[in-house]
Amino acid sequence: MNVKALLAVTVTLLFWSSAFAGIRQALDGGYSPGHVVLIRFLSASAVFAVYALITRMKLPELRDLPRILMLSLVGVTLYHTTLTYGELSVPAGITSLIIASAPTFTALIAAIYLKDRLSAKGWLGIVIGFLGIALISFGSGHSHSFTIGALIILFSALCSAVFFVLQKPLFAKYSPIDLTIYFTWLGTLPMLVFSPGLFTQLVHAPSAATWSAIYIGVFPAAIANVAWAIALSAARTSIVSTALYINPVLAVFIAWIWLGEVPHPFALVGGAITITGVVIVNLWGTAKQRVRITSTNQDSKLLHK
């Protein structure tokens, strides 16, 4: 990996990994989950509006709008709203470990929807991944509310997997950054339902919480996506993609430094098991599976931190 790609990957991973702690900081400051996602994606939409004006970005073709709209609702509106609600009761670091299971869901959905045949090792990886998820969700020694929150975040991971698989055909026509902008703008519109009471919260919330909500929109949701596109253009996709496995590790570390969160050992073991399952699925799921899943995770990891 050359220096340009390495710097771009480093920036991307740091911003994406910090998003989980940023969400938690905003929630702890008194913002409701709905207001957090709204502030976040209004901020990201504003950054992308500037980018679109500077680059004179073209709008999508009308015939592609229904698919783009559907994916925006699943991959942005639903994914980020449920993720943020889940973090009400789940620590930021643990959230990142649960979200790391998304490629396992992606492999399963691709096997069904895209008729990708999984090898025995692929199925083994899926089983291992789900065992890890179960350990994170039910074996951490936390309260019942944590379990419910973990299930909500697990649903977020499922949404992200659906998003990964169904958007694949669009990459033949649009660049990852252009698609990310379309998804961001259209996915933000339904979030306007959370507008009531936003001004009051902006006035009364601690400044640290407000800046955290803005930060996760400007940096993890916008700037990091541009850096990721630069990384993909500057180095081989298969090499760049391996860096994604560092995300949960960095997220746990950042949550520890930023928020003082110390994950339960069972959750860390579960996270390690989940990531092991993900690696098995991606590397040995079958040749066709590997190309499809890896490609989707690189291009569509955008917006998912």
Image (cartoon, rainbow, N blue to C red):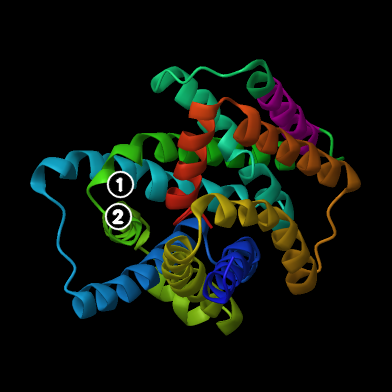
- Discs 1, 2 touching: Cβ within 8 Å: yes
Seen in the picture, residue 15 relative to 79 is either above or below; the reply is below
Give the number of the disc on residue 179: 2
- Give the mark nearer the N terminus: 1 vs 2: 1
Dominant SS in magenta: helix
Q: Is residue 275 left or right of residue 1?
A: right
Q: Residue furthest left?
A: 62
Viewer-side residue, 117 vs 47: 117
Q: Residue at x 49, y 36 (%)?
A: 291
Within 10 Å of disc 2 (Cα), the crowding (few <14, some 14-19, many 20+) is many
Q: Amino acid at mark 2?
A: Leu
In x, y percent, where is residue 299?
A: 43, 51
The magenta segment is 124-138
Cα–Cα gap, marks 1 and 2: 8 Å
Within 10 Å of disc 1 (Cα), the crowding (few <14, some 14-19, many 20+) is some
- Quarter of the figure with residue 221: bottom left
Viewer-side residue, 21 vs 200: 21
Query: Under tag 1, what secondary structure?
Result: helix
In x, y percent, where is residue 258?
A: 73, 73
Q: Residue at x 51, y 57 (%)?
A: 33
Q: Residue furthest right?
A: 265
Give the number of the disc on residue 146: none
In x, y percent, where is residue 91?
A: 72, 54
Q: Is residue 21 visible?
A: yes
Seen in the picture, residue 135 relative to 93 is either above or below; the reply is above
Q: Quadrant of the C terminus?
A: bottom right
Q: Residue at x 42, y 17 (%)?
A: 115
Seen in the picture, residue 153 relative to 111 is either above or below; the reply is below
> What residue is disc 1 on?
171
Q: Residue at x 63, y 38 (%)?
A: 101
Q: Is residue 267 magenta?
A: no
